[in-house]
Amino acid sequence: STSQKNLPVKAKTTCSYCGVGCGIDISVNLKGNIEVEGTSDHPVNRGMLCSKGRSLNYVVQDQSDRLLYPQMRGAKNHPLQRVSWDAAIDRAAAVFKTFIEKHGPNSVGFYISGQCLTEEYYLVNKLTKGYIGTNNIDTNSRLCMSSAVVGYTKTLGEDAVPIAYEDIELADCFLIAGANPAWCHPILFRRIEQHKEKNPNTKIVVIDPRVTDSCALADLHLQLTPGTDEVLLHAIGRVLIESGNFDLKFIQSYTDGFEDYKEKVLKTSLEEAAVICDVPVDQIQLAAQYIGDAKGFLSLWTMGLNQSTQGVNNNLALINLNLITGHIGKPGSGPFSLTGQPNAMGGREVGGMASLLAAHRVQANEDHRKEVADFWGVETLPDKPGLTATQMFDALDSGEMKAVWIICTNPSVSMPNADLVDRALKKAKFVVVQDISSKSDTVKYADLVLPAAGWLEKEGTMTNSERRISYLPKVVDAPGEALSDNEILIRFARRMGYEGFNFHSIEEIYAEHCRLTKGTNIDISGLTYQRLKAAGTMQWPVPSADHPGTPRLFEDKKFYTPSGKAQILPGGNKNECDQLSEEYPLILTTGRVRDQWHTMTRTGKVNKLNKHIPKPFLEIHPEDAKVRGIEDGMPVLIQNDRGEVRVNATVTEKIKKGVVFLPMHWGKILQNSFGRANNITSKTFDPTSKQPGFKYSAVRVEKYKKP
Ligand code: SF4
């Protein structure tokens, strides 16, 4: 129920779905009914909202699925029973203490989410790395943005998206690679659409193995074979170099590494690249021509490039196109990774991954560890690298890790090779699930369930894809006994006997985080809740109290690398990935549909969103369908050694021949065991970013015959 004390309420907040970060006006009337509307003067969405954002009020008001009070099992396989918060926190602290004492701090870990607010991310990282003494904390951003993090860091010296959304209206060429913003970042796509309507000469190139809705706006669609992105991007680079369509002055003044890159891209002829990627030579040449002729060139990418065992190489290859053409640090230009989750950026700012420390410091760097340890007033930070997402579930499976605390994410549906994840959660000695929804498939593996407050029910900050930080107020009360994630973590830390968690408000947590960024490239020491509330939103860095924020980075062409120059890197060798075979001849790629979000624990509650695409499906090309006797709508079986999926076929020329597509949203609760795409995805990951290759799994498809 909404707060009865403060009605009616009007407030401004930010959408809690994708990384676009649209502003939302909230009103709660005397009856407690919530209404949402796009904030008309918000710099991101200018009053617009997509179907998901527009339905957020239903999600908050429908509390039928909410976890309302802590629950605990007396022992494995015993039923969950309601307990008090004190009993729940006592149990969590007792179990964690026992494992830490008996098996060391690396026997426990936290798996968190890009949907956590920045303060929550900060607290749980401080707790894990600073006090428990392990780097075993990773986030579902590992499945989403970690290849982009490495790509930016290697080339620009910092995990920093250099553009601002206002660059959209200043660009005259867009390269959209491995992304379907029409469905997954709809408001940004609407801005691109409006820009092209006003400026029809704007060129849009889409690289995708599927004909998505984003292709409707494209002047050119390169329908490549999955896994060949780097080859295609290098081929475009080759044409730019051979046609003299590159910026030699910029390259010589502001970059290192061009000669190595040139040597690499010239090694593969255009004809060879065309065969590897299955994209005609003239299309590669035309893409290069559009980029070469542009005054403002924005490259946009997301999961298609990142979720690959080649994820880092893909990122380098794309960023190189901006660097060799000098299209960075100027209006309408830059490499722009579209963030998936609403606060994946904020999470990275506080060092929310196993490999990071606060303010983009690096866990492997001794000086960085010392800086953070000194700031927190602890002796040292652990030097052993932490387990990343897939490694953590492997470690639970093998028994190396005993306990995991999962916050705001549903790995039973979202992780690759999900059967292994289920097995690992069953085998784990102790699983804590801290969430808002009983409809998360992961809840059933929990020994301890902690009910959390959701969007509008707690206060904090988030950072969107363009480094824009916004303040989210608490507007309504959480249902039942649910507490904010910060409150839960503070109670646990205090029960563990840790000092350093004596916060009296969320604002104090944020202020501490801001102080820890001082002097770094992402300095927001000039930011306070007061400033954020007054300004609405601000883009980092904000290094002093009178600094106005920074919409576009690198306008001075000074990069954050040791040489001060951007690094044009040729990329490494091809990494191991699933192999096609006679038995498994088709490439499975997975992705999202327009009106669902992640594992549907929120969007799945909204009837009008479910109507768009009510069930999971397999897209298959007519020729691949025909040889298998498959007709449109028929049930099909998709299999490999990891498991199987049974859904109905959508026979369509929109998918490339030899490739099939499954949406990733449905889990066992909302569908059945056979609708979960991740039953069959590969957990092979990029060796540097550790991001799994969801976009390339070898499978067999056949008609499903009832046994
Ligand atoms: Fe929310 Fe993203 Fe839609 Fe904007 S585009 S309303 S942030 S889901």
Image: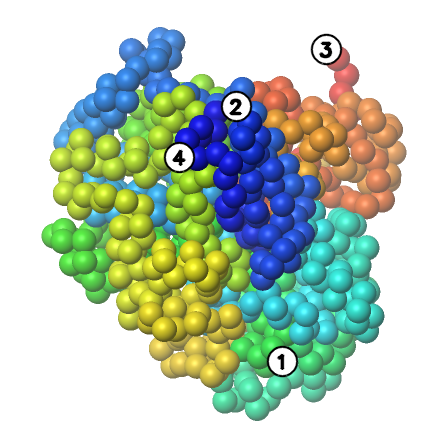
Badge 1: few (under 14), some or many (20 or more) residues near its Cα, within 10 Å? many
Q: CA distance from mark 1 to mark 3?
A: 59 Å
Q: CA distance from mark 4 to mark 2?
A: 19 Å
Residue drawn where x is 57% and y is 91% of the image: 249
Mark 4 or mark 3, whichever is nearer to me: 4
Per the image, label 4 sits on a secondary structure element best described as: strand
Q: Disc 4 vs disc 1: which is toward the camera?
A: 4
Q: CA distance from mark 4 to mark 3?
A: 40 Å
Q: Position of residue 61 (x, y in %)?
A: 55, 28
Residue type at numbered disc 2: Gln
Q: Residue at x 79, y 72 (%)?
A: 199
Q: Amino acid at mark 3?
A: Pro
Residue corresponding to mark 2: 63
First reached walking from the N terminus: tag 4 or tag 1: 1
Badge 4 or badge 3: first in the primary sequence: 4
Image location of residue 495, percent across then percent down: 18, 31
- The numbered disc on residue 707 is 3
> Residue 325 shows which numbered tag?
1
**Residue 653 horizontal/vertical position (percent):** 85, 44
Name the element at disc 1.
Answer: loop
What element does badge 2 sit on? Answer: loop
> Which one is earlier in the sequence, the residue at label 1 or at label 3?
1
* Nearer the camera: disc 2 or disc 1: 2
264 left or right of 518 in image: right
Q: Which residue is mark 4?
A: 407
> Residue shown at 62%/49% (left/top)?
38
Query: Could you tell me the amino acid type at mark 1?
Result: Thr
Q: Are marks 4 and 2 in contact (CB under 8 Å)?
A: no
The numbered mark, 3 or 2, whose residue comes first in the sequence reads 2
Q: CA distance from mark 2 to mark 1?
A: 52 Å
